[in-house]
Amino acid sequence: MYIDPHVHMVSRTTDDYRRMALAGCVAITEPAFWAGYDRSSVQGFFDYFRLLTETEPRRAAQYGIRHHTWLCINPKEAEDPGLAREVLAIIPDFLEKPNVLGIGEIGLNKNSRNELVILDEHISLAAKHRQLILVHTPHLEDKLKGTKLILDALRNQKIDPGRVLIDHVEEHTVRLVLDRGFWAGMTLYPDTKCTPARAADIIECHGTERLWLNSAGDWGHSDPLMVPKAQAELRRRRHAEELVRTVTFENPKRFLGQSPRFNAEPPAPTAPDLVR
Ligand SMILES: [Zn+2]
């Protein structure tokens, strides 16, 4: 059994839901992010938020998976502050939807000035509406610098670090994130970012406190089964079942459970071809 707390099902097929369910997935959370193309207007985001709050929960439920989501305009498309502010203005209405856990994945992509301004405005929005925050850290060579800028922005607005998950941590950023009291996510990719073996090394060096694993499956070369593959790697290294459960189920449940909307009880699957 596992939770994948970061996977972009908008870019995956229904067959992926089926395979995830068979591998033991009971709940997922889908942060709003780049959908593989730049949207031309706020209307594109309105439709995307409807997909995240209406279509995907229904599609996931067919396979007995509980779907939750996070809302924002991602840093990749936040270079245009005018568009970004129009999107920020429609988010509060969607925060009322029953599967929304908070604001995310916000953060930085190229660490630009505009990205930083819009990041600050997202943090303010989350604070105003008492929302959890899920943060994307840049994948380029600027990950360490970007992570520091984000942690400082959160501290400047006096956000409780226990209510923020900093995602895509790697060997050189995980300690910084945990030492400041934040939660940390390791994104497992087939070859780039963090592999299951590197994630297992990080757990062996830093323990399991406030750490989780996710696949971040998206429109690019990625794999929505990376969490069960990491479970297999941890078992291969003879780690206790309790440790495997802590990083792939209990920790996500603890962090996400800070929102009353989170529910790890899967709905009964309705898909006829699913055998549990
Ligand atoms: Zn993502």
Image (cartoon, rainbow, N blue to C red):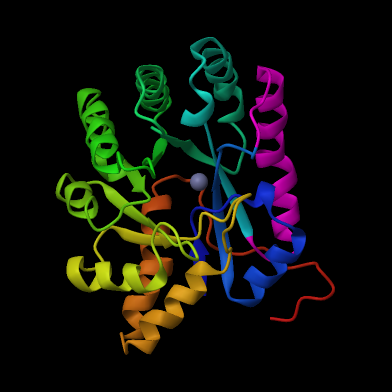
Measuring from the top left, give residue 273's x and y in whole percent.
82, 76
Quarter the C terminus occupies: bottom right
Extreme residue toward the right, this view: 272
Q: Is residue 232 visible?
A: yes
| Residue 52 in picture, x, y percent from top left | 66, 41
147 or 66, which lies in front? Answer: 147
Residue 153, picture quadrant:
top left
Left/right of residue 272 with respect to residue 129 in the rendered view:
right
Q: Is residue 268 visible?
A: no
- Percent from the top left, x then y, of residue 118? 42, 20
Q: Nearer the viewer, residue 84 or 55?
A: 84
Looking at the image, the residue that sits furthest to the front is 141
* Left or right relative to 7: residue 152: left
| Residue 187 within the magenta-colored segment of the rendering | no
Range drawn in magenta: 37-65
Residue 219 sits above or below residue 25 on the image: above
The residue at 30%/38% (across/down) is 142
Check residue 49 for magenta coloring. yes
Q: Residue at (50%, 51%) from the top-left corner?
A: 262
* Count of marks, rendered view: 0
Farthest-out residue, left:
179
In this rendering, is residue 102 above or below 264? above
Q: In this view of the protein, which residue sits in the foreground, 16 or 71? A: 16
Measuring from the top left, give residue 218's x and y in whole percent.
59, 51
Describe residue 47's horizontal placement relative to residue 93 as left or right.
right
> In which quadrant of the rendered view does residue 235 lie?
bottom left
Which residue is found at the position 39% from the left and 21% from the top?
128
Q: Left or right of 233: which side holds 181? A: left
Dominant secondary structure of the residues highlighted in magenta in the image:
helix
Residue depicted at 68% across the width and 20% down the height: 40
